Image (tube, grey):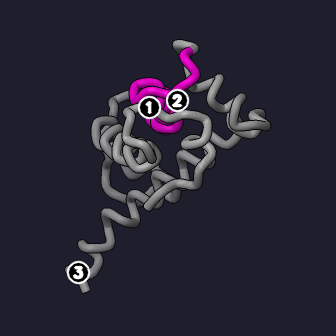
Amino acid sequence: MRAMYALRAPRILALAVACTVAAVVAPAAAQVTATSEYLERMDTDGDGRVSLPEYLDWMGYAFREMDRDGDGVLAAHELPGGRGGPITLAQHRERLAARFAKQDANGDGVLDARELAAPPQR
């Protein structure tokens, strides 16, 4: 039983963080009505594409909001339901970078409006 939980724990934590990210980012994203607006908000240098640093900055918002003590680690008491192992900002950014790479369908290192609008890849 313990071994089965150990195998599921990383998936459960990832799901919890993803759900929390969606819940915290939703109010900001709810004001965006078109992919072009979403791109415009993420694209801080105005080149019409979203780079990895821009993506990490935008998507890191939820982590910063949940990290109430500002120590760069989401502890169990900062996670939804108060459960789960700690996750560092570095770990969170690694997961976001992996998601970015999956969304970058043409592999050019940036996300265009079409890639941003596409459903997340597995």
- For residue 55: magenta? yes
Secondary structure of residue under mark 3? helix
Secondary structure of residue under mark 1? strand
- 81 with respect to 53 (left or right): right
> Which mark lies nearer to you, 3 or 1?
1
Quadrant housing the C terminus:
bottom left
- Residue designated by label 1: 110
- 104 with respect to 119 (left or right): left
User: Which residue is situated farthest in the bottom direction here?
Assistant: 1
Q: Main secondary structure of the magenta part?
A: helix
Q: Amino acid at mark 3?
A: Arg
Q: Amino acid at mark 1?
A: Val
The image quadrant of residue 93 is top left
- Residue designated by label 3: 2
Residue 73 spot, x, y in % from top left: 33, 38
Quote the CA–CA distance across marks 2 and 1: 14 Å
Magenta residue span: 47-67
> Is disc 1 surrounded by few (<14), some (14 to 19) or many (20+) residues within 10 Å?
many
